[in-house]
Amino acid sequence: MKVFALCDVNNFYVSCERMFRPDLNNKPVIVLSNNDGCVISRSDQAKALGIEMAVPFHEVKAIIKKHEVNWFSSNYCLYGDMSQRFNHILKQHCDQVISYSVDESFMCFEGYRESFRTIGLKIKAHLQSTLSLPVCVGFAPTKTLAKLANHVAKKNKKASRGVVDMTVESTRHYWLKRIQVNKIWGVGRQLSKALVRQNINTAWDLHQADPATLRRQFSVNMERMIWELRGVACLQFDDVPISKKSILNSRSFGHTINDCGDLKEALAYHVSRCCEKLRNQGSLASVVTLYLYGKRNNHTYLHRPSMTVVLPEPSDDTGVFIQAIEGSLHKIFKANMGYKKAGIMLNDLVPKTCYQPDLFSPVKTRPALMQCMDNINLKYGRDSLKFASLGFQNKWAMRANAKSPNYTTRWSDIIRISA
């Protein structure tokens, strides 16, 4: 029998910060979003103080000061490296592992005779002893049920010890009757409201609903969800994610930018990130749009120039797009506008394998060079090799007043222990 499992790290960003700061264990800790804007990760102790997810940082400063809450700026380099190590450990317990997000991965078990609860506890112990990452694991015959099993494990950490096995039908039915419908994977706020209007309040109610009727009312995805709740796997383990139809990368600046050179570096950075995503999904783009945000007043940007450039032929070459936006930037840039944000969007994406290039096209791509850059950056870290247009000072970089060291990816940040 094929069994799916979902392993999820509890409070991932906070757990990564605590790994190298054991003095923070059992203390309230939060991690903030870009530019130290909002709370995006909280320890259990911080949750107990009433700090909500996504609340602006300035609204909880009083609580932070009163209860001495430890706070950190986002350290995505550290979190990305820890995510890779997390998946490496999982692959030592299961030969089929697929990362779903930075802090959770699906596993597929076939032919295992050992009880899944025992396997889950071994995974938990291994991750705790090697990476100090607290996790919860849910087992079930479908991916949707594995998500629910993981949810139950999180909500009942002490009783379940962080592991819930829903492969047994009686256990599955017991929990489905106690889980609200909005907790089901794929049921968003609006969809849950529509289901509640039809007296479908729990996962069990949806489990009992007629698949054909709800398919007509909603979509085929709803029918698949019902069958998944009944234990019939409709979502395959190795389902390939649908390629994006557009790619966007943007970021607010840590302070106001008035220099065109600094804006050029910021846009070149966003172009590099977009082209990396473009190559990762095997696509080409022929349209690039750059936009700026300046003169903000009462949460409204008074100056929002943008320009779209159409390439003669689709490409995934970072250099081609950087050249395309340089001339456009000078056309829309105005001095002393106080720019606070910039971004790049790539559109008109086509699969690279299905596109026949024009022999006489003026757009010269360099696939070998791009592949070489990607390989070097993958091995030695992002932007180890980059275009000079990205610059080196990063005056436009986002605010990060309490960023932790890059303990695992930078030699100068490695912890030193005195003898």
Image (tube, rainbow, N blue to C red):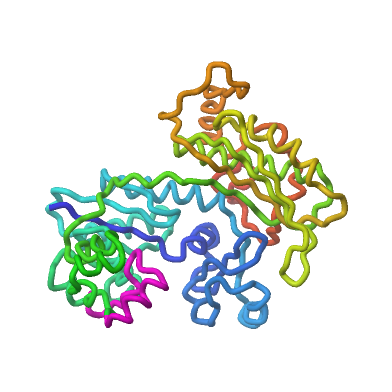
The residue that appears at 19% across and 65% down in the rendered structure is 212
Quarter holding residue 232: bottom left
Horizontal placement of 35 versus 283: left or right?
A: right
Q: Position of residue 165 (x, y in %)?
A: 21, 65
Q: Position of residue 372 (x, y in %)?
A: 54, 26
Horizontal placement of 364 versus 211: left or right?
A: right
What span is in magenta?
175-199
Horizontal placement of 315 versus 61: left or right?
A: left
Q: How many marks?
A: 0
In magenta stretch: residue 80? no
Reply above or below: 345 against 304: above
Q: List the single residue furthest toward the front.
A: 216
Res 419 visible: no
The residue that appears at 30% across and 56% down in the rendered structure is 123
Reply above or below: 196 against 10: below
Horizontal placement of 331 versus 56: left or right?
A: right
The residue that appears at 30% across and 70% down in the rendered structure is 153
Quarter holding residue 54: bottom right
In magenta stretch: residue 179? yes
> Closer to the camera, 14 or 151?
151
Q: Position of residue 47 (x, y in %)?
A: 50, 77
Q: List the single residue furthest toward the top.
A: 359
The residue that appears at 46% across and 65% down in the rendered structure is 11
Reply above or below: 177 against 382: below
Res 32 visible: yes
